[in-house]
Amino acid sequence: MNQRLNSRTITGRLVEVFRREGFDGASLTVLARGAGLGRASFYHHFPGGKADMARAAYERASRDFTRAVLAPLAGSATPAERLQRMVNGLDAFYDGGRGSCLIDVFSLGGARALFRTEIAEALAYWAHAIARVLIEAGIDPAEADRRAENVIIAVEGALVMCRGSGRTEPFRRVLEGIVPALLEGRRARVA
Amino acid sequence: MNQRLNSRTITGRLVEVFRREGFDGASLTVLARGAGLGRASFYHHFPGGKADMARAAYERASRDFTRAVLAPLAGSATPAERLQRMVNGLDAFYDGGRGSCLIDVFSLGGARALFRTEIAEALAYWAHAIARVLIEAGIDPAEADRRAENVIIAVEGALVMCRGSGRTEPFRRVLEGIVPALLEGRRARVA
DNA sequence: GTCTATAATAGGATAGAC
DNA sequence: GTCTATCCTATTATAGAC
């Protein structure tokens, strides 16, 4: 409890707790235990209290997501390669299907009002980033939008399925299907 | 606050609150306001307290889901008709994409331990019910399992997407795609 | 920068009047 | 069957020592 931890470590551990417990389920006691700090020490790092902690966790997750999932989409490789790197990033970011998505978790209860805008923007941004790659790959823009949205839906749904079933196969299977489905000749698939 | 309500009404309102707030976010105060009762009055209906209320809500939702979504799958109509009735049931049950799924919501935080088993079983049951219809329609059993799971993933993912984006189009679009995707490649195509 | 101690409030639950 | 009043605990937050 008395070891000095850097901000990065603390924030990373907060992400884990919020993912598992949700915003309202993550009490300061649970967060403190997860972060390896006393409750009071939190207020040195996050003067705004729990809302501050959640925001730090969200922004940390957001940056990690950008690096792992979004950045590869903007690279200079071929569309298929960039999409595959996004898939690899998703696998890492969501720990093979074991981790929940903060977009899911923070759109409920007390966190809803705090993250409404950011979450809507994040979803739109991700969809747009995928669609751009597809358009570059020669897919009709409207179809690209649909396929991009389908990927997000499949990933979010697979995470819920994994959490609910206690299995990780659904996530792995969805990941395997993403690149083929996105670049498929002309037909869109639901999942 | 002083109007007498029957159990059905109270439980139905609890479902709404838990869907919106999650288990940990739904305080007795919020639940009571949502149900139109004083906090103390709850303990007449649910002697076990909040866990009892959540269980009643879950079982109520479960029964409604069975009636709206699962029952049509077991009917005597053609596979395509039964699947379409399931889709119609999903639209009603999830209020066109405006309502969250308790499987998502109750697999986080304090509710996780309470509903772990039920949730895993419910997901497996639903998948199996869909797959049986597909097998009857002439689809290979392993492929039927995959497609059935894809539907659940797409529905859960669409609900997360709708909650996060504030739009309902993703849910409607997913629903429209379900029957075609499930029966794709089958010999008897509906014109 | 972390701790102990403590305050203030909200949450869950109960007793008993009506 | 619902209410007011109350209790106990957990939760959030702060003060101040180290």
Image (cartoon, coloured by chain):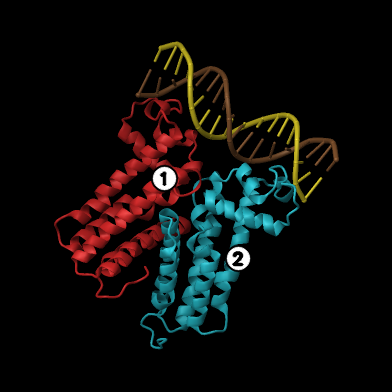
Chain colours: A red, B cyan, C brown, D yellow
- Quarter of the picture containing the C terminus of chain A is bottom left
Q: Which amino acid, by three-letter code, is at mark 2?
A: Asp
Q: Residue A52, how many percent across, how many down? A: 41, 35
Can you see residue A121?
A: yes
Query: Could you tell me which chain the residue with mark 1 belongs to?
Result: A
Q: Which amino acid, by three-letter code, is at mark 1?
A: Phe
Q: Residue A100, how many percent across, how many down? A: 40, 51
Q: In this view, does A176 lie to the left or right of B45?
A: left
- Quarter of the picture containing the N terminus of chain A is top left
**SS at badge 2:** helix
Which one is nearer the viewer's eye here, B105 or A148? A148
Distance between mark 2 and mark 1 Cα atoms: 31 Å
Q: In this view, does A11 lie above or below A141?
A: above
Label of residue A63 in the image: none
Q: How many C-alpha atoms fall within 10 Å of the one at disc 2: few (<14), some, or many (≥20)?
A: some
Asked if badge 2 and badge 1 are on a common chain, one would say no
User: In the rendered image, which quarter is residue A37 located in?
Assistant: top left
Q: Mark 1 points at which residue?
A: A115
**SS at badge 1:** helix
Can you see residue A91?
A: no
Residue drawn where x is 44% and y is 42% of the image: A114
Q: Residue A10, how many percent across, how many down? A: 35, 34
Foreground mark, 2 or 1, reads 1
Q: Is residue A139 above or below residue A54?
A: below
Q: In this view, does A191 lie above or below B110?
A: below
Q: Name the residue under label 2.
A: B64
